[in-house]
Image: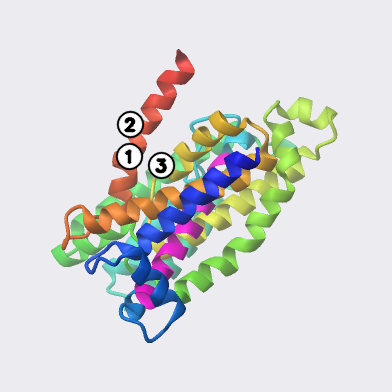
């Protein structure tokens, strides 16, 4: 068990080092460590002000998406569930596209609009998913998420088609996701929104194990099923909304990572959630390194890289599960 954690932490550390070393100005590991230790060293501004916040933000976003995906897969007992299940992608995209289309300026305008759109979509999906007696129907949540995402996507497409070419490009780049706007301020904002939901989901680890068995079984084994479902929906929605607000929509991390972790650590969420956080962060940081260097000086959207890596990975995992 300790050996697995050591491997995971080591891989995460190597990913962080790669994120600090590779870029338009490549640095050796020694130069990276000197830049971190001495603000006056060569390359210190690049490492401290540009790459370090990007690496930390990548770990926070990737980890948050992976933990959200693992929690939602347990909640709805569906291995295809991901953080955008509850209409989050549609709501976030619509909010951001509206802000871009009206020419709203300011570094935080689009993130705030995306956050508002995400929270609005979650509230709508949650209301549609309530059954008689205030009970949350997970099947209705799935359908409501699809409906809200489809409706928001239709409005979003109409706005993009009617927008000028420059605004159209900005909207597409944001929708594909990226860490290019990373700063210590965005790291602080994301951390402020992420800590409590992550702790809440960690506290619910045993209840998530029970929910994986089915709601009736979970209730008989002592879980307060309705309360747990509400807490999981609220925590995953807040995590995903905050991540989307600062980076745009980055897919497949929250879908693929929980499956990989379950293969190596099993289904128990006490170990699965922290391992998913580390692996999700590692995956996104490495994807960002590829996005920055593969076609340099052109930078690819990170969402494109995670899709190119995530689709074959998920296909391989799917074939293995069906074998």
Q: Quadrant of residue 24?
A: bottom left
Is residue 68 among the parts visible in the rendering?
no
- Nearest to the observer: residue 306 or residue 278: 278
Residue for point 42% across, 65% down: 246
Pointer 2 residue? 312
> Are circles 3 and 2 on residues that touch, CB within 8 Å?
no
- Nearest to the observer: residue 52 or residue 37: 37
Name the main secondary structure of what is drawn in magenta: helix
> Are circles 2 and 1 on residues that touch, CB within 8 Å?
yes
Residue 294 in the image, given as x and y percentages of width and height = 21, 52
Sequence order check: which comes first, mark 3 or mark 2? 3
Which residue of the protein is positioned furthest toward the front in this rendering? 30
Instruction: Count neighbours of disc 3 (C-alpha within 10 A) and say few if under 14, some if 14 to 19, many if 20 or more.
Output: many
Instruction: Count neighbours of disc 2 (C-alpha within 10 A) and say few if under 14, some if 14 to 19, many if 20 or more.
Output: few
Sequence order check: which comes first, mark 3 or mark 1? 3
SS for callout 1: helix
Whole-number angstrom distance, CA of label 3 to CA of label 1: 9 Å
> Are circles 3 and 1 on residues that touch, CB within 8 Å?
yes
Pointer 1 residue? 309
Pointer 3 residue? 252
Q: Which residues are magenta?
A: 47-71
Does 202 appear above or below 146? below
């Amino acid at each position: 068990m300790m050996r697995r954690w050591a491997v995971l932490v080591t891989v995460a550390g190597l990913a962080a080092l790669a994120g600090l070393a590779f870029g338009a100005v490549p640095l050796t590991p020694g130069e990276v460590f000197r830049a971190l230790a001495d603000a006056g060293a060569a390359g210190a501004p690049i490492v401290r002000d540009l790459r370090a916040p990007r690496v930390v933000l990548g770990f926070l976003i990737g980890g948050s998406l992976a933990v959200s995906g693992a929690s939602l897969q347990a909640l709805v007992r569906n291995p295809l569930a991901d953080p955008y299940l509850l209409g989050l992608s549609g709501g976030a995209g619509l909010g951001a596209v509206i802000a871009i289309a009206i020419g709203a300026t300011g570094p935080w305008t689009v993130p705030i609009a995306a956050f508002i759109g995400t929270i609005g979509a979650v509230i709508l999906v949650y209301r549609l998913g309530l059954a008689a007696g205030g009970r949350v129907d997970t099947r209705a949540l799935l359908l409501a998420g699809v409906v809200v995402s489809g409706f928001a996507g239709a409005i979003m497409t109409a706005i993009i088609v009617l927008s000028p070419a420059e605004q159209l490009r900005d909207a597409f780049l944001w929708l594909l996701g990226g860490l290019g706007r990373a700063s210590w301020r965005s790291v602080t904002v994301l951390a402020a929104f992420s800590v409590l939901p992550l702790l809440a989901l960690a506290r619910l680890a045993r209840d998530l194990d029970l929910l994986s068995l089915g709601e009736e079984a979970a209730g008989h084994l002592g879980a307060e099923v309705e309360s747990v479902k509400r807490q999981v929906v609220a925590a995953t929605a807040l995590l995903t909304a905050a991540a989307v607000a600062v980076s745009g929509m980055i897919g497949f991390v929250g879908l693929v990572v929980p499956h990989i972790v379950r293969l190596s650590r099993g289904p128990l969420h006490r170990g699965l959630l922290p391992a998913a956080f580390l692996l999700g962060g590692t995956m996104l940081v490495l994807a960002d390194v590829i996005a920055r260097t593969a076609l340099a000086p052109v930078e690819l959207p990170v969402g494109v890289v995670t899709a190119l890596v995530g689709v074959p990975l998920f296909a391989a995992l799917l074939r293995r599960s069906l074998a």
